[in-house]
Structure formats: C-alpha cells, structure tokens
Image (cartoon, helix red, strand yellow):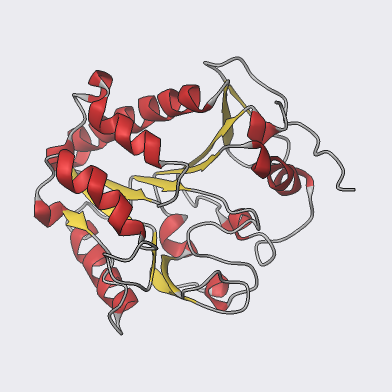
Amino acid sequence: MTPTPEPIPLAPLEETIKGPALSGRVVVGSDRHAVYELLGSQLLSTALDCVTKFGDFHFAVSGGSTPFPFYQSLMTDPRYRSFPWARTHLWIVDERRVAFDNALSNWRQISEIFCDHSGMPDSQIHPMMATATDAAEQYEKLLRSSLGSRPHGEDRLDFVLLGMGDNGHTASLFPETSVLNEKNLWVSYCDGPTVTPPPRVTMTYPLLNNARVIVPLVMGANKAEMIARVATGRDDFHALPIKGIKPTRGELVWYLDRAACGRD
C-alpha cells in the first residue's frame, strides 16, 4: 500500500508559503478556480511591467488539461482586459512531433484559444514546426533572434508556465533522457524508453532556468504523492526532471491547489 504523502502546510488563500524543500515560493489556492485567479494576477502584473520596461512581453505556455481553463479565462474574464496582447510574444514550451491538426498536438489546443481570440499579431505567435527535421534548430534560431532585440541581460523569456507529469517530468524533459544534460542549446529533442510517444521537441534547462518568472502549475490529488516526493525526497533531476528547474536569476513560483498538497 502506498503511504499517504505528507501534506504541504497550507497558507491562507491570498498568501504564499515556502515549502521546506520546494525551492522558490509556493502559492496554494483553495480550489483550481482560486489558483487560476492568483496565477492570473501575477501573470498580468509581470506582463504590464515587462511592456513598460522593454516594450514587449515573452510568454511561454504548456499544453495539457490543467492550464486550458486558465487560458480560456484570460480571454473571457474582464479583469484581464488590460492584458497587453498586442505587445506579447507567445511561445510554446514543448511539442510532440506531429502535425498541428493531430489530436496529440499541444499547439492545436493552444491556438484555438490564443490565436483566435487574443488579437496578437501573427508575427508574435510562435508555434514549433515540430515535424521538420531541424525543428529544434529552427525554434532556437527564432528565439535568439526575437529575444536578441532586448538589452543585454534581459534577452530571456519573461514568464514560463510549466506542468508536472505523474513521473516528475516537466516540459518534454523526461526522466533519464540525454536532453537533461544539455548545457548550451535552448531547444532540443527528447525520445527514449521513458518518453510517452511520440518523440518531442522541447525547451531545455538553459533557456527555462534563465526566465524571469517560472511557474509550475500543479493541481489534483493524483499529483500529491509526486509533490511530496519532490519536496522531501532525495531524487535528483535525472529521476525527477522537475527538480532541474532552478532559476539562475529569476523567480520560481509553484501554484498548487489543496488537493495537490495532500489536502482534500
């Protein structure tokens, strides 16, 4: 029988707590709607600040069912009417090597929200051409070109929204894969026995960890055991790739609901 994970101490809704071994801040909402509201507040604040300072905002998103309602709320909730979409560059953290019309494509889901409703200029929307033989090289070139217009030291992503799989993977950084050891490339490929097919193209630690704000969004009771393992276990990033997310000069903020903390 699997032991019940030790719950992370729960903070009041509007406050943040520091987990004993979860680096960065931990923000806990009473339910997923509260989590989305708290996350939305930080995202909007960061976006407006970056546009004021640099003239643009670089936002990297992940696919999956957890962030999808949040993306929808950004389009429909009147509290986000001031979001600077016209100055936003949209990037995708990772993609399966399938066509955009494939049901497994992350971009298929994301584009239905952002491309159709945000009003972002097409030139600022950056899908991964994941079926191309040089998909990773193309995307890295595009990232470096776009971010290169920023002042030196600010040529980085501003806000990266990540998820966490049941096996501790994040982006398409899967356990015991060679891409975890990448030190220079910003974008690379991921395949192997621990990777859920099909093969992937993914942002790597050097790019992700250089971001201004990195947010793992993790919700649901099915993630509680892994959150406890990340917080208290001795596994390194090869076993649990989420543990390789360590900002070099930015902020790491976990957004969790009660269930992910082991609190029903």
The answer to whether one can see residue 169 in this image is yes
Horizontal and vertical percent position of residue 198: 46, 74
**In the image, is 66 to the left or to the right of 2?**
left
Farthest residue, direction right: 1
Task: Give the residue displayed 31% in from the left and 73% down from the top.
Answer: 130
Farthest residue, direction bottom: 133
Judge by depth and name the residue closer to the eye, 20 or 192.
192
Task: Give the residue displayed 34% in from the left and 72% down from the top.
Answer: 98
Which quadrant is home to the C terminus? top right
Q: Quadrant of residue 45?
A: top left
The answer to whether one can see residue 155 in this image is no
Task: Give the residue displayed 38% in from the left and 35% down from the top.
Answer: 69
Count of numbered circles in the view:
0
Residue 109's place in the image compared with 24, above or below, is below
Judge by depth and name the residue closer to the eye, 236 or 191.
191
Horizontal and vertical percent position of residue 123: 10, 56
**In the image, is 165 to the left or to the right of 2?**
left
Task: Give the residue displayed 25% in from the left and 65% down from the top.
Answer: 144
Residue 95's place in the image compared with 242, above or below, is below
Q: Quadrant of residue 234?
A: bottom right
Horizontal and vertical percent position of residue 25: 57, 33
**In the image, is 165 to the left or to the right of 82?**
right
Judge by depth and name the residue closer to the eye, 97 or 23.
97
Residue 235's place in the image compared with 176, above or below, is above
Q: Quadrant of residue 228?
A: top right
Residue 71's place in the image compared with 186, above or below, is above
Horizontal and vertical percent position of residue 173: 53, 65
